[in-house]
Image: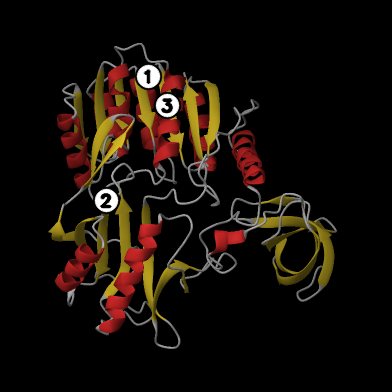
Amino acid sequence: MIAKNQTYEVRIEDITLEGSGVCRIDGFAVFVPMTAPGDLARVKIVKVLKSYGFGIMEELLEPSPDRGADPCGGCGVFRRCGGCAFRHLTYEAELRLKEKAVKDAFQRLGSFSQEPLPILGAEQTDGYRNKAQYPLAVMSDGAIAAGFYARNSHRVVPAENCPLQPPVFGKILGEILEFLREYRLPVYREETGQGIYRHVYLRQAPSTGKVLVCLVAVKKNPPRIRELAERLVKKFPETAGVWVNVNPERTNVILGKHWQHIWGEKELTDTLLGVELGISPASFYQVNKAQTERLYRLAFDFGEFSGDEELLDLYCGIGSIGLTAYRQIGRLTGVEVVPEAVENARKNARRNGMDRAEFFCADASGAAKRLAEQGLRPGVIVVDPPRKGCGPEVIEAIGEMAPEKVLMISCNPSTAARDCKALCGMGYRLVKYQPVDLFPRTGHVETVVLLS
């Protein structure tokens, strides 16, 4: 029997999307963080459950050829931070593992036998993120810090210069921390609910380099916020605007419902596949612009638009998918539940002279059902759902509208496979699917799917 605190010499056989290696001891699965497939390691068992356990690597006896040479790009917090899953692997190994994860999900959960097309890897694996959310914390010594949550916890690991973010993010964050320390401003303590400043939220427009700075606080007009805005604007010309997001709730949800504009521009402007897009701080926008352009091109190639289709874009956000496809289709209808994003989408259509586009604010499931009842019959439906997937109401409404093609862009292989299986149960067939790595070094992967 496997028991806690026993030590074993094991060969790591596989790895999860969370970055934990998998080995078997007498047929019993054990998950070991910071290991790579092919590693020979001495592992200590730290937790035993009914059908699997967890271990920690005490000694690496023989490294896998898939191990990378520079974990965390010099940042030094990879082993404690919960952000990256694959910093200890080569990027080539990471791509193989992500492709396998997508294939496994479609075969195991979707019952599809066909292979995915080869994964589309990123040309840039560092500095690609145009958005970052840093929790603020008071450390055990009383110091104010910001960084990321440790794996499976809400304990903040200080990290001001994450290599996944553009360098300017670290500089702005450092200045904000210096200001908070200088004036001894009250930082929120999750365990007590006391304090005011909770998070620093930064968003950049890659085409211009401009940055929106947002401080998440428990109330409007947090102390010295305008002084802080003046200081950031003076020191960082990249600062386009400053916001406060108000979140008074005792919750681990980062953003609250209310926004307060403090200074400068209210939104960023970026260009995606030649389309100018306005992005408010509350709106969804993919974090990796270069890979997003490749992702959308791939989806449009899958769609093989004839030029006169009516396209329904569910979960449309600021309209980025539909508007970048606009020149290849006949008419566009977009649905999004976030009001600020819908307003962005409408403005984006106007600023690009796209008068055959209509956007309205509604929950995707309710809107899809209502459109189906109204007799809308789009030739193509695009879905880019959250991690939980489309849900049965959306799938049912898609079946009622019966488009010739469904294009799915999914950030979760498991729910993508589930939803594709449901659509195939309504008469669709899976034509092809392909993983795309929008999030290098992390455990996330996108998948583009065509059903007809």
Q: On the rendered image, what quadrant is the N terminus found in? A: bottom right
- SS at mark 3? helix
The residue under the point 83% across, 67% down is 8
Picture layout, residue 100 above or below residue 161: above
Q: Is residue 125 above or below residue 70?
A: above
Residue 17 pos. (x, y %): 60, 50
Mark 1 or mark 2, which is nearer the start of the sequence? 2
Q: Nearer the viewer, mark 2 or mark 3?
A: 2
Give amino acid for label 3: Arg
Residue neighbourhood size for the residue with mark 2, other residues' Cα within 10 Å, grouped as few (<14), some (14–19), many (≥20)? many
Task: Please report contact status of discs 1 and 3: CB closer than 8 Å, yes or no.
Answer: no
What residue does disc 2 label? 210
Q: How is the image coloured?
A: secondary structure
How far apart, in angstroms, are the residues tagged by discs 2 and 3?
A: 25 Å
Give the residue at x 31% y 12%.
307
Relative placement, left or right, of 212 versus 386 is left
Relative placement, left or right, of 44 versus 260 is: right
Q: Residue 203's mark?
A: none
Q: Are marks 2 and 3 in contact (CB under 8 Å)?
A: no
Q: Quadrant of residue 55?
A: bottom right
Counting residues from the N terminus, which is met first, the one under dot 2 or under dot 3? 2
The residue at which mark 3 appears reads as 297
Which is nearer the eye, 346 or 373?
A: 346
